[in-house]
Image: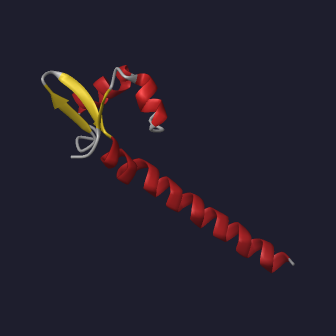
Amino acid sequence: MGKLIKITATQELELNNIFIKPSTVRKWNHAGKLLEVIIKLNNRLYIDVDAWQRLVVDPALLERDKKVSRLKNINNIIR
């Protein structure tokens, strides 16, 4: 478990590039989504920042890098 941030601490979540409303996190927890990211301690919900980075941010960056490399290849072919 990494750094935990309370879901009600919206400013701290935004500083860590997590732009989710607390109500959304509550719904996801109730539905059983992202169980490795959402942690419940003492009837309070927290987001594990390290798990968020692994599951959401890292794959998005990889996808962006793939698109950039494809565009560069297309640009080289056109020239």
Above or below for 68 versus 28: below
Q: Position of residue 37 (x, y in %)?
A: 28, 41
Q: Residue furthest right?
A: 79
Q: Position of residue 38 (x, y in %)?
A: 26, 36
Residue depicted at 21% across the width and 46% down the height:
1
Q: Which one is in front, 39 or 15?
A: 15
Can I make out residue 11 in this image?
yes
Can I make out residue 20 in this image?
no
User: If the image is split into quadrants, where does the C terminus sit?
Assistant: bottom right
Which quadrant of the figure has residue 7? top left
**From the viewer's perspective, is 32 left or right of 56?**
left
Residue depicted at 12% across the width and 23% down the height:
42
Residue depicted at 44% across the width and 38% down the height:
16
Which quadrant of the figure has residue 27? top left
Above or below for 17 versus 12: below
Q: Position of residue 71 (x, y in %)?
A: 71, 67
Residue depicted at 71% across the width and 75% down the height:
73
What is the image's colouring?
A: secondary structure
**From the viewer's perspective, is 27 left or right of 78?**
left
Q: Which one is in front, 21 or 7?
A: 7
Above or below for 26 versus 73: above
Q: Residue furthest left?
A: 42
**From the viewer's perspective, is 40 left or right of 12?**
left
Q: Which one is in front, 54 or 72?
A: 54
Q: Position of residue 44 (x, y in %)?
A: 20, 22
Q: How many numbered dots are placed on residues in this image?
A: 0
